[in-house]
Image (cartoon, rainbow, N blue to C red):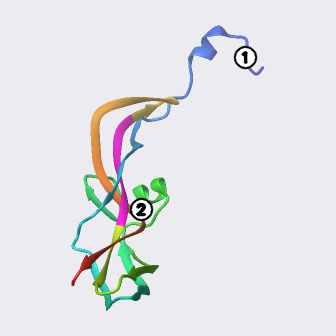
Amino acid sequence: MASDFSNNPASSIIQPRTDGYYFFGMLKVNLNKEQHMVLGVLGPSGAGPGTISVNKEDTVTNTITGAYTSVSAISSYIGASINKSQSYSVNYSLPVPKGKTYQIKYRPLYTKYKIVQRRYYQIDGHSSPTSETKTCYVSIFYDWGFSYNIIK
């Protein structure tokens, strides 16, 4: 005769337990939008009266610094490629008054994110945070910044 343990109160206490494991969860903090003053690129110059323009493609790279589990995990979480060059259009026009000479300057603008990864311990369907964290900073291109030099 087969035993039926379904009505035994002790059987509900005895559950198969999975082995515990660690994983990293992430928290994104938008720090700020900033102009990286990496000199910028000198564009065309011209004398007025008239207009000078820059219309071209240029390459930028989203970057990551600090401690992190993997670039692909951070890239997936933030929704942008990291450490891969991408080309974007640069378009800007500037009127130059009579008797003046201007030169266009442009530079990439980035949003900087702070990503904190906290290690968790998972067992039996419950996760508990540990004190271990990894912190990195990711700069994501969002636009071009323009300015100009007055040459004369």
> Where does the image place residue 59, in percent across and percent down from the top left?
38, 80
Name which quarter of the figure residue 46 lies in: bottom left
> Where does the image place residue 44, in percent across and percent down from the top left?
33, 89
Amino acid on which disc 2 is placed = Ser
- Identified at 40% across, 56% down, the residue is 74
In which quadrant is the C terminus drawn?
bottom left
Residue 16 vs 54, above or below: the answer is above
Name the mark nearer the viewer: 2 or 1: 2
What residue is disc 2 on?
72
In the picture provided, is 86 more to the left or to the right than 151?
right
- In depth, the one of 48 and 52 nearer the eye is 48
Residue 135 vs 76, above or below: the answer is above
Q: Magenta stretch?
A: 109-120
Badge 2 marks a residue whose secondary structure is: helix
- In depth, the one of 74 and 9 nearer the eye is 74
In the picture provided, is 56 more to the left or to the right than 133?
right
Residue furthest toward the front?
Answer: 98
Residue 33 — which label? none
Asked if the magenta segment contains residue 115, the reply would be yes
